[in-house]
Image (tube, rainbow, N blue to C red):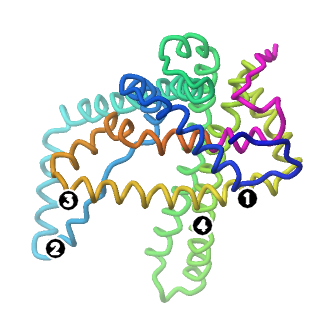
Amino acid sequence: MEPEQVTTVSVLEPVGWAIEKVKQILFRPFDLGRWFVIGFCAWLACLDQGGGFNFNIGRMKFDRYDASLFDKAKDFVTANLVWIIPTAITVVLLIIAVGIVMIWLSSRGKFMFLHCVAENKAEVKIPWRQFKVQGDSLFVFRIIASLISFGFFVLLSFLLVTFIIVLSRAGLKNAAVSVPVIIGIVLFVPLIIAAAIAMAVFYKFTYDFVVPIMYLRRCTCVQGWREFLAMLSADKGAFTLYILFQIVISIAIGMIVMLLFVLGMCLCCCGFFILCIPYINVVVMLPLVVFKRAYSVCYFRQFGADFDVFTPRGIVVE
């Protein structure tokens, strides 16, 4: 089922097109080796998304020992600063280095995975080399965007903590000070939430639409964003509807994933733990991962042939 020429952009029709792409890519015919290769590219593309499980072990009570425990911890840290500080710095630098490498690999992986979906091919070396410039451009763009967003959230957090400290020192009896501070805190919390949502939408647009533009035009991330911004300003309603429908899709996929994990745990505990292995998890869930990638590009192709990754024209932007 292929899309026809449309006059309006739909969020529902691409669902059928994306399901058809999943069938073509993974099941016509089914090839386990091909499945694992595409799964590897998908795993690279998803490296930056993290994942895991949160375990709630309940409230821990230290009413009798809070003071002594903190005092002992303070004394221990003070007595061992000579090796604690270098170790902490080393660990932080190592975490940052690993994070940067993961962002770089995932930036290259996003083009590799898009290549597999768009071309219906299971290839690693060809897209790794072919989209080196675009992958590196996306990597640099993401690092700069991450630094800007990190600085912004640090500033907001600093201001929020400052308000809380002023409130605690002023006390509730000093209404002249405490009321404005409380109002400030109430205003800061929605601001932080709004900023977090804005950043999530920003990265969503980058991965779902700017990356396909870079893929088609062989352009940089900044050039891709410049072209997408023109589209976004011309049709804000369509992309707002897309984001809202993505929430629905995410809820549906989340329920499916939860059901699979429950079934895996019920059928075999080993199967449950195997599903927790990142690469194996992506391989098992590959139809869902391919669907998400295919849906975004199927939606995007409704804006014209120049945005159809399934028939790339090889347009190069100098």
The magenta-colored residue range is 295-318
Q: Amino acid at mark 4?
A: Phe
| Foreground tag (1 vs 3) | 3
Cα distance, mark 1 to mark 3? 38 Å
* Residue occupying the point 78% across, 32% down: 307
Bin the neighbour count of mark 2 within 10 Å (Cα to Cα): few under 14, some 14-19, many 20 and up. Answer: few
Bin the neighbour count of mark 1 within 10 Å (Cα to Cα): few under 14, some 14-19, many 20 and up. Answer: few
The residue carrying mark 2 is 61
Q: Amino acid at mark 1?
A: Leu
| Foreground tag (3 vs 4) | 3
* Residue occupying the point 65% across, 59% down: 245
The residue carrying mark 3 is 266
Residue 250 at x, y percent in the picture: 53, 56
Pick the front one: 83 or 42: 42
| Foreground tag (4 vs 1) | 1
The residue carrying mark 4 is 188
